[in-house]
Amino acid sequence: MTEPRGESDLHRAWGRKLYGWWHHYNEGYLDGVLRVPLIRLGGGGEVLGSWDLSRRLLRIAEEHIATDPWLCVMETLRHEMAHQYAHEVLKAVGEIPHGPAFRRSCQKLRCTPAARAKGEDEHGKSAEDHVLQRLQKVLSLTDSPNEHEAETAVKKARRLLLKYNIDAVQIDRERAFGHRCLGSIKGRRASYELWLALILQEFFFVETLWVPTYRAREDKPGTVLEIYGTPASLDMAEYVYAFLRGLLERLWSDYRVAHALPGNRERQRYYGGVLEGFHHKLSEQEQQIVTDRALVWKGDSQLKTYYRYINPRVQTRYGSGVAESAAYRDGLVEGHKVHIHRPVESAAGFGGYLKGA
């Protein structure tokens, strides 16, 4: 039976994207040593990808592309490229499929050696369960109707993470780092979103990067915010991100009604003002922590090494600022009043941990 023309065109677009990203990883991680294989879309089932040495055929499951985030598909692509590298460059033809040569290949391609079926988590239980549990208990207080109690809980959570990270750096404790994506894939980024990333990076112990990705069902490129850090820091940063995104929408809705604004022309300026005001507030709190507790964060060299390992060819670009307006100035004032509460229940990270607490 012949495929509908639209679906056939989409599948061809996916094939082109797979070849394009294969070349990207071959050049970026392997200095171009691999020969281009035959890349095809696979059928259904639980297998996400496969590498066939005899046919030099790399397959990625069609359903995987259609239903999973593109960066997860790229993890699968790199996993299969690691099999190709182990066979064709390291000549590990007689080894077991996930033997030493394959694991070395995975290190080069920044992917997990474990073969995964659909729905499995690539990480085991975190070694940081203790600090995660303490953060959960502290952040459960953000549901308090008492604004002072809620703000005190967030300050305590930040001090807890600050002390934990400072101690880990000072004794050079080995740490498990990971990365995850926040928010939706978009073609263009607004200036206020840069403030969101800056807040997470400066105050919540993660590195941030807007990474290129792809909306497979729409055949459109875009970018998404990726954060890097320890499991505890990733969860806290995701918690804050979810809260701030929901807060901006609610604040703007109220502001627009209060000022009888006919449309959303000033929305981005208002968002930028709120986030800049909140950034100023966190900076003031940081200085207070330094004064009261003598806790000074100087960064984490292990985290920066991990970040550079995952992103060896990072390019820094600077966006334009937010144009000043009455809405922007009002947003600055509102940002100084922000108190972090529990994010929406659908959010991952601590939003999930705290459901029903």
Image (cartoon, rainbow, N blue to C red):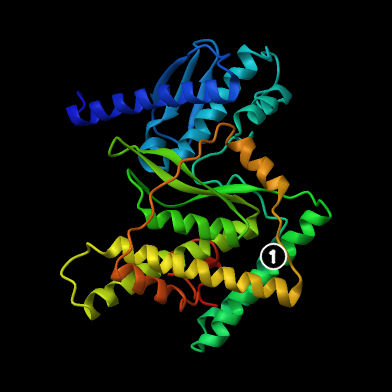
Asked whether residue 36 is in view, the answer is yes
Q: Position of residue 298 (x, y in %)?
A: 71, 56
User: In this figure, which residue is indicated by the disc labeled 1?
Assistant: 162
As displayed, is residue 35 above or below residue 355? above
Tell me the residue at 69%/65% (across/down): 162
Q: Nearer the viewer, residue 108 or 317?
A: 317
Q: Residue at x 52, y 69 (%)?
A: 280
Instruction: Kindly give the residue lying farthest to the bottom in the view shown.
Output: 146
The outermost residue toward the left is: 262
Position of residue 290 in the picture relative to residue 274 (left or right): right
Mark 1 is surrounded, within 10 Å at the Cα level, by few (under 14), some (14 to 19) or many (20 or more) other residues, namely: many
Nearest to the observer: residue 38 or residue 182: 182
- Left or right: where does residue 295 sit relative to residue 237? right
Kind of residue at disc 1: Leu
Q: Where is residue 77 in the image (x, y as percent from the top left)?
A: 50, 29
Vertical comparison of 31 with 263: above or below: above
Vertical comparison of 82 with 288: above or below: above
Kindly identify the residue that appears in the image at 34 percent across and 74 percent down.
Answer: 330
Q: Quadrant of the N terminus?
A: top left
Front residue (pair 5, 190): 190
Pick whichever, 284 or 78, lies toward us.
284
Q: How far from the left and from the top, in percent, is residue 72?
A: 48, 40
- In the orientation shown, which residue stands out farthest toward the right? 171
Q: Residue 251, how many percent across, how many down?
A: 34, 74
Q: What residue lies at 70% left-to-right and 22% top-to-bottom?
A: 101
Q: Quadrant of residue 157?
A: bottom right
Q: Quadrant of the C terminus?
A: bottom right
- The total of numbered circles placed on residues is 1
Q: Is residue 83 left or right of residue 270?
A: right
Residue 276 vertical placement versus 175 (above, below): below
Residue 47 seen: no
